[in-house]
Structures are given as C-alpha cells and as structure tokens.
Image (cartoon, rainbow, N blue to C red):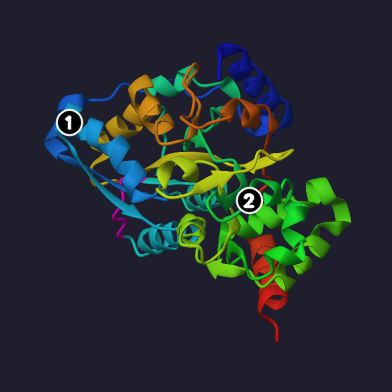
Amino acid sequence: MGSVMYGRLVAALMGIFLISCFAPSLQAQPVNVEAAKKEGKAIVYGTVPPQSMEAINKPFEKKYGIKVEYWRGSATKVGDRALTEWRAGRPGFDIVEGNPGLQVILKKEGAFARYVPPSSEKFPEQFREKDALMTAWRITPLSILYNTDLVKAGDIPKTLDDLLHPKWKEKISIPDPAQHTTTAQFLWNLRRFKGEKWLEFVKALARQKPHMVESFAPVPNVITRGEALVGIGYIKYVKQYKGPLGYVVIEKHLADPYYMGLGAKAVNPNAGKLFMEYVCSADGQRATAGEGEFVLYPGIYPAIKDAEKVAPTIVFMDNPTEDEFKKLRAEFREIFFAK
C-alpha cells in the first residue's frame, strides 16, 4: 500500500468515523525510562493472540530490559476480568487493550489514568481521544475467511449473503453472538447496509447451523482443520495463523479501532507508559503491522496481500450501549439456540 492509498484510507476513515467523539489530545507526556526499568515489568491484559503479541513484546523487552506479562482473552473475558478486579479494589493490570465497547466501560468506571504517548501524536487527529484516557493503536477489519485447500476458487463466497447458500450449511464458523460482544456488535451493525433486513440475515445464518466458538481467535483453527470451510473473522488472521487460510475482499469491511488504557492504579505505571509509547512508535507499529495488523502510524502498512483494496472500504462499527448489548445477547440466544 503506497502513500496515495494511505491518504485514501485516512480520508475514508475521517468521512465515516464519529469525529465528534474525538478532539486533539492533551499534551503528550514524556516517559521516565529509568523509573520504568526499576519497576521491571508491565502487566498487559489484551485480545491479541499470544503468538502475535510476542512479536511486539520481544523487541520491547530487548530494548528496555523490561518484562511484559501478557494475559490474553476474548474481549468479553478481558472486560470481565479487568472490571471484576477493579471493582474489588485489586486491579492486577497496568494496561488493558481491547475494542471500544470494552474500553469505554472501563473508562466509565474510572479504571484508566490520563496518558498521551508522545508517538501517538503522529497518528491521524481523529484517533486522538479528547480526555486522553484511551489511545488507539490498531484497526481490525472483519471479512469472510476460508480454507484455501478445501474451497475451490469458483466456490469462494464473495459477499456475506453468499454464506446463506445451502452448500455452507454446518460448514461456517462464527463466535457465539449470545456470548461474544464483538460478534453481537458486528451482526447489529449490518443494519447499516441491510436496513430492517439485517435481522432476517441473522436468522438465516442461524439456520445454517454454524460451528460456534467463544471468540474470533478460534475461527481460523476451525477452518484450517477442516471442521468448517468458511467463517467470519479478522483479516489479520491470514498472517497470524499457519495453514491454508485466505480471506475475501468484500464491498465494505466493518472494523473497530482498538485501544490501550493505562490503569489508574497501575502497579507499574512507568513501565506501562513506556510500553504504550513503544507500541505507538514507528518501531512498535512496524512490529504490529508485521503481524498483519492495520496500524495508525503514517507510512506503515500491514503485511497482507491486497491490503490496499481493503483500506478504502473500512467502515467503523457503531457501539451499542450496555443495555442494548444485553438485549442483543438475549435475542441472539433465542435465534441461535432456541429449540
């Protein structure tokens, strides 16, 4: 993806994102590197698969001699753990990483401290949150994934509606939308393209009897093992998982910006700040893009074929309220599991 395509990406994102939610950030804060080294470690809760996070963490550890203790879970599990610890007055995290739904809940609870990594000021302005309690660092477009060995070229689904063809019955893998927050959000956002018919699509998808998993992370494994032939998951997985895995460039790719937040009661606040600064720096963003992630640092692009075709089609998802999420989960439970 060249500089022209990056410009198109930024222009597209600016046109479709809720710019009113963003404003120039508070002044960036320098990091006390020596204090961070004395703390010796940064504890991170996040949603990035461990093998990919290792590619980001290891250069940081080598550069600063600071250990990263990383705990990975689905967005729902990360949120549940961090929120439970915070409300109990015993937060075990220095940093929480996740999607907007997860992060906003923690922010409202007062779990994050204000911090602006200096390198993040190089990101497009619409990504700088006005109260400096969260820092965007990557973007996660979703699409159709498929097994490149078992799905013939002529059979590759070109649209989400193609997944409703009878040939894909019991051969689709998706996370359980009654449990997985981001899948519920994804399906709910289809109303932006399908209008009132979005729920008809969901019901038709349920009739396909999909192979349910707990989050997007297991979907590639299910597909590469041949337990399902197609599925819905992050485009980045074609880089992050071994095996015969491809993705489809569809008309529009729903996505979320993912954020990091520094714990308001972090045990290792300086190490946490340094880690956030690193992942926002050119080195950290290159390491992140090398794992197939779409990042925000100008001139750095994901190591994925046809990324330049995906970039201008990204549409950010709206975020249901907490009450709307509860209603959606109940509705999806009825649709997918009612006898």
Q: Is residue 223 left or right of residue 272?
A: right
Of residues 2 and 67, which is closer to you in this image? 2
Q: How many marks?
A: 2
| x, y percent for residue 238 | 49, 43
Quarter occupied by the N terminus? top right
Magenta stretch holds residue 93: yes
Q: Which residues are magenta?
A: 90-95
Residue 110: image location, x then y, percent: 45, 49
Question: Would residue 236 be visible to someone looking at this image?
Answer: yes
Which amino acid lies under the numbered mark 1 shown in the image of this protein?
Lys
The residue that appears at 50% across and 21% down in the rendered structure is: 123
Query: Could you tell me the amino acid type at mark 2?
Result: Lys
Please say if 118 is above or below 217: above
Q: Which residue is mark 2?
A: 152
Q: Quadrant of the C terminus?
A: bottom right
Towards the viewer: 109 or 54: 54
Above or below, 56 relative to 327: above
Q: CA distance from mark 2 to mark 1?
A: 44 Å
Q: Which mark is residue 62?
A: 1
Hey, which quadrant is residue 176 in on the image?
A: bottom right
Q: Is residue 321 visible?
A: no
Q: Secondary structure at mark 1?
A: helix
**Residue 226 is inside the magenta segment:** no
Q: Which residue is located at x 81 percent, y 46 percent? A: 193
Q: Is residue 145 above or below residue 214?
A: above
- Callout 2 secondary element: loop
Residue at position x 64%, y 67% in the image: 326
